[in-house]
Every structure is written in structure tokens, then in C-alpha cells.
Image (tube, helix red, strand yellow):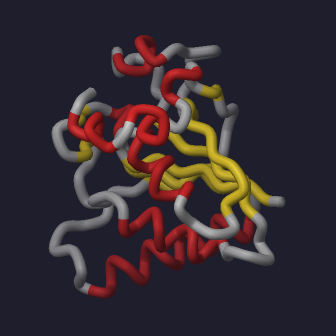
């Protein structure tokens, strides 16, 4: 098994998108990329921790490639809006790929460059690509949020 860690706005929807992918064995939502130790959801929402809302994925590389996971990442958010996704604004909602290996770093950079060159977006892609750091698992009520509460909660935050 391997890990992938992605931030693309509110982690509830990002987690749901990755849970649909064959070969993804497990997902967890949490916080990474900041300096605040053991943050809570309230801490991260303050915008003062430096953390992004992230999804950590455990996947079977014999069933799904990292490049396929990158495609899911790019398809499920607007990577051109700096520190914002839809109505959610703040650094905790930034677009980021947290790589675990040199191979993931290379794949992430290549996919970002290819997407930028594709002309799909008129604005520059603002997604950061940075080494994975400490992942702090979010509180249980945030795990598999839509699965537990149904899709009616998608617009509520």
C-alpha cells in the first residue's frame, strides 16, 4: 500500500471523490501543511495554524496509479483560485499536493505543468506541491461526512 495526500478545499467533498476510486483502500480527513501541533477543526478554521484541510489516502498501486489519483484531484476542484474553493475562503482551503516520495513529486509537477499547458484554465494554477508533513486526523464527525449524513449536507458548512 502507498499513501497520497491532497488538499482541494473542504475535505468532505474531496474525501468522497477519492472514496469512489477503485484501488483506494482507505481515506482519512485531517490537517497538514502547518506548524500548529494537534489542531482541531476550530483551530484550522481560524486560519492561524497554517494547515490545509486534507485527505490522506491509502491506495493499492497495483489497482490505481498515482497519476490516476492526480486526475481525480484536478477534476474535483478549481486549482486556479488561491486559498479558496467555492464559498470557502482561507489558507486552509488551498489547493495542495503533499508528496510522500520523489516519484510522487515528479508526477505531481508533471501533471500540473501538463494541465497548465493544456489551456483548460485561463488563469495560472496556484496548487502548491510540497513534501508531506505531519498529518493530524480530524475529529470523527468529519470522517466520511457525506456517507454518514447524506448528500443533503453538501451545501451546509
| Residue plotted at (53% across, 55% down) | 97
Q: Position of residue 95 (x, y in %)?
A: 39, 50
- Left/right placement of residue 136 relative to residue 126 reads right
Q: Which image quarter: residue 132?
A: top right
| Residue plotted at (48% across, 34% down) | 148
- Left/right placement of residue 39 relative to residue 102 reads left
- Left/right placement of residue 113 relative to residue 67 reads left
Relative height, residue 18 to residue 13 (above, below):
below
Q: Position of residue 85 (x, y in %)?
A: 25, 46
Residue lying at the far bottom of the rendered structure:
118
Q: Looking at the image, how many numbered discs can be counted on the residues?
A: 0
Q: Quadrant of the C terminus?
A: top left
Q: Quadrant of the N terminus?
A: bottom right
Q: Position of residue 110 (x, y in %)?
A: 53, 78
Q: Which image quarter: residue 150?
A: top left
| Residue plotted at (72% across, 61% down) | 59
In the depicted view, which residue is nearer to us: 134 or 142?
142
Q: Which image quarter: residue 86?
A: top left
- Left/right placement of residue 145 relative to residue 140 reads left
Relative height, residue 27 to residue 149 (above, below):
below
Q: Position of residue 18 (x, y in %)?
A: 53, 57
Relative height, residue 53 to residue 132 (above, below):
above
| Residue plotted at (39% across, 47% down) | 13
Amino acid at each position: 500500500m502507498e499513501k497520497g495526500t491532497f488538499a482541494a478545499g473542504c475535505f468532505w467533498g474531496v474525501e468522497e471523490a477519492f472514496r469512489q476510486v477503485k484501488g483506494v483502500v482507505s481515506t482519512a480527513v485531517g490537517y497538514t501543511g502547518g506548524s500548529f501541533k494537534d489542531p482541531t477543526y476550530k483551530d484550522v478554521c481560524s486560519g492561524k495554524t497554517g494547515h490545509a484541510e486534507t485527505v490522506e489516502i491509502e491506495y493499492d498501486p497495483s489497482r490505481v496509479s498515482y497519476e490516476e489519483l492526480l486526475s481525480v484531484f484536478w477534476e474535483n476542484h478549481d486549482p486556479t483560485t488561491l486559498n479558496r474553493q467555492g464559498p470557502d475562503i482561507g489558507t486552509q482551503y488551498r489547493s495542495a499536493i503533499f508528496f510522500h516520495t520523489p516519484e510522487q513529486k515528479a508526477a505531481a509537477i508533471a501533471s500540473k505543468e501538463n494541465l497548465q499547458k493544456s489551456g483548460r484554465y485561463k488563469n495560472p494554477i496556484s496548487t502548491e506541491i510540497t513534501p508531506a508533513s505531519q498529518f493530524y486526523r480530524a475529529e470523527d464527525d468529519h470522517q466520511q461526512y457525506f456517507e454518514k449524513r447524506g448528500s443533503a449536507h453538501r451545501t451546509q458548512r
